[in-house]
Amino acid sequence: MTRSNKESAGGDKLILVGNPNVGKSLLFNALTGAYTTVSNYPGTSVEVSRGFCEIEGNRYEVLDTPGMYSLLPITEEERVARDILLAEEPYAVIHVIDARNLERMLPMTLQLIETGLPVMLVVNIMDEAEALGMSIDIPLLQEKLGIPVIGAATARKRGLKEIRAAIAAFDRQRRAVFGYATDLERDILKVASTLAGEYRIDRRAIALLLLQKDGGVEELVRATEKEAGYAGVEAAVNAVVFERRSDLHLRISLERKRVCKGLLEGVVSQQGREGKRFAERLSDWTMNPWTGFPILLVILYFGLYQFVGGFGAGTVVDLLEGSLFEEHINPWFISVADRLVPWYWLRELLVGEYGVLTLGVRYAVALVLPIVGTFFLVFSVIEDTGYFPRLAMLVDRIFKKLGLSGRAVIPIVLGFGCDTMATMVTRTLETVRERILATILLALAIPCSAQLGVILGLLSGVPGTLVVWSVCIALVFLVIGFLAARLLPGEKPMFYMELPPLRLPQLQNVLVKTLTRMQAYFLEIFPLFVIASVLLWAGKMTGILENLVSAMTPVMHALGLPGEAAAAFIFGFFRRDFGAAGLYDLQTSGMLSAVQLAVAGVTLTLFVPCVAQFLMMKKERGWKASIGIFVFVSVLAFTTGWGLNRFLLFTGILA
Amino acid sequence: MKCGFCGREIPDEPGQEKSCGTCPGGCRKVHCPYCGYANPAVPGFLKRWSKKKDDKREDES
């Protein structure tokens, strides 16, 4: 038979599914050899591989689906993988999982079994699991799951014979059933009993997906049940969702985890060590409040205070700004301009007080870039270890007191990177109340990475101001969050997040991420710093800046700051870090005392978000809410600055 | 690429990099579809550099 004849002959379908990077494609290649085609799945840009194989005289068509984490799709790739399961008629669905991460991947096996599809499980990468000292009792797991389970290491061609044998002997009629808690089962049954049409997958699985508001399955049910029947289904789903409120997702997820834990009992054992590995113990410590907060303080002290503040803002900035720019580059620019440019206005534009070269380039290259560069380095190291999701779990308890769900931890933690992006991420929160609360807190008390880096660099030079700043910002965050939670009543949903493993940072990853962030940051700020210099120059030449500074001088004086600080506040609105860099200049020229430095740092951090964040607030929350937040944040920033100045002068702290 | 926050694999397909529209000069971040985290979009020269290093390591092993 020629190849084309074979392809047209088709065969029973074997569908490979599983998370990305578990060895699906290796298994696909091992099964199919050269008989493969790759084409886009209809109507999408996602590629699906198809191939053919022959096992014990029977011909099979093998489909390699895109990686998926759950039957509830989020990405287009996952949607395609799920659609293949819903649309094709498989002889067997082969779920490939990573032996090293059984607990994380087994919930999807349960989901697949729930659908009623004929499932077999391949526990792959067994060799690496064994190298880690793990021992997996495959026959016991098979007995508990009630489906064929094969241990394999496809990269080493181990287990392929057993997989072929299992396919040949596969009994499609054998089915396992797993029960959830009684109340959840009652809800599932309530929805499943309203489904009258014919479906390729089990009604119970359809009901679960409907309860989790899966758009694709809603469409499918609407089309199958027609409008009259769908109304009843919708009513049943809404009744359960209303009764359970927003914890339904979490509840289903935790139930699956509970079942998986039971399934894995006695199946996995770790040889050569007692109890948990160090990485697992460290992971637990980072999330326990008693050990987690001291660990956080150690990270902040060594990572941010010592490295960013001491090394970045001290040593590197002194070298670049103090020695290179102030002593060599700027004097050279000025002397060249004095010799070659006869016009005062152009000299001012290039090398004057707010000159493009003497201020814009100096701020961007010598002051801000080294500070944010060292900050990005620390940030990338922390990110690469997988610490951030643990930080989210750690602060979850405090967040619940602020009326925020643990999910709000994600945008708040992300805000330390970029508040604009974090404001966009607030849309993932479940209630409008939470979104508004998180937006307020982001605009008010969460400094972005650039501002945080520069503020840390600025304050770390004067001991004590950093402590005052940290306490003040934390207090404002907690008090405003606490009050806002009481003024805006509503539901308080639970938070659950699957944690990636804690690991040692990889030097290459850290370098690539740091350089990427520095390049992106520099490309973004350089033109803005030049524009800001031009605007300041134009303001100086026309007298507008003087008028603006004069108008703000009483406010600055009320805060106990010199009038010159007004410019830093005006331009802090355009770029948070530009404002902080302005303060840095005032500080290094000896114009700010320790008290003034602390007051200016706190007020500038709390002060209105940058223009990009304001536009994002408008996009997400609308004009009314964003202007309201803008006014509230501005008034609160200056009131706090005024109060702090009075307090510090009265108590003599920092004197 | 793997998300720096939740550790999940972000599908590497054209058009995946959804921009929030506020970064001057275009978006240089890849938003994770699972948690919303903005991962830095690695520029071409760094991608090539890291790939070269990976290839070299594979050749040596």
Image: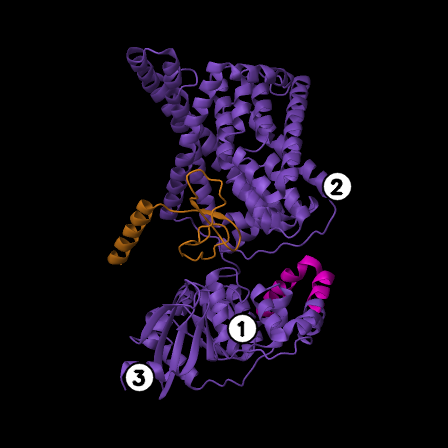
Asked if residue A456 shows in the view, the reply is no
Q: Nearer the viewer, mark 3 or mark 2?
A: 3
- Real-space Cα separation, disc 3 to disc 2, in angstroms: 72 Å
Q: Earlier in the sequence, mark 1 or mark 3?
A: 3
Q: Amino acid at mark 3?
A: Asn
Q: Which residue is mark 3?
A: A5
**How many C-alpha atoms fall within 10 Å of the one at disc 2: few (<14), some, or many (≥20)?**
few
Q: Which residue is mark 2?
A: A487
The residue under the point 62% across, 17% down is A560
Q: CA distance from mark 1 to mark 2?
A: 44 Å
Q: Earlier in the sequence, mark 3 or mark 2?
A: 3
Residue at mark 1: A112
Principal SS element in the magenta part? helix
Magenta stretch: residue B50 in it?
Answer: no
Q: Position of residue A13 (x, y in %)?
A: 43, 80
Say which label, 1 or 2, has the lower sequence index. 1
Type of the residue with mark 2: Leu
Q: Chain of mark 3?
A: A
Q: Which residues are magenta?
A: A236-260
Q: Residue at x 42, y 25 (%)?
A: A363
Give percent across and percent down for residue A40.
39, 66
Q: Are marks 1 and 3 in contact (CB under 8 Å)?
A: no
Quadrant location, the C terminus of chain A: top right
- List x then y, in percent, for residue A119: 50, 77
Read off the chain for label 2. A
Decide if residue A621 is on the left or right side of residue B42: right
Q: Chain A colour?
A: purple
The chain that appears orange in the image is: B
Q: Secondary structure at mark 1?
A: helix
Categorize mark 3 by other alpha carbons within 10 Å: few (<14), some (14-19), many (20+). Answer: few
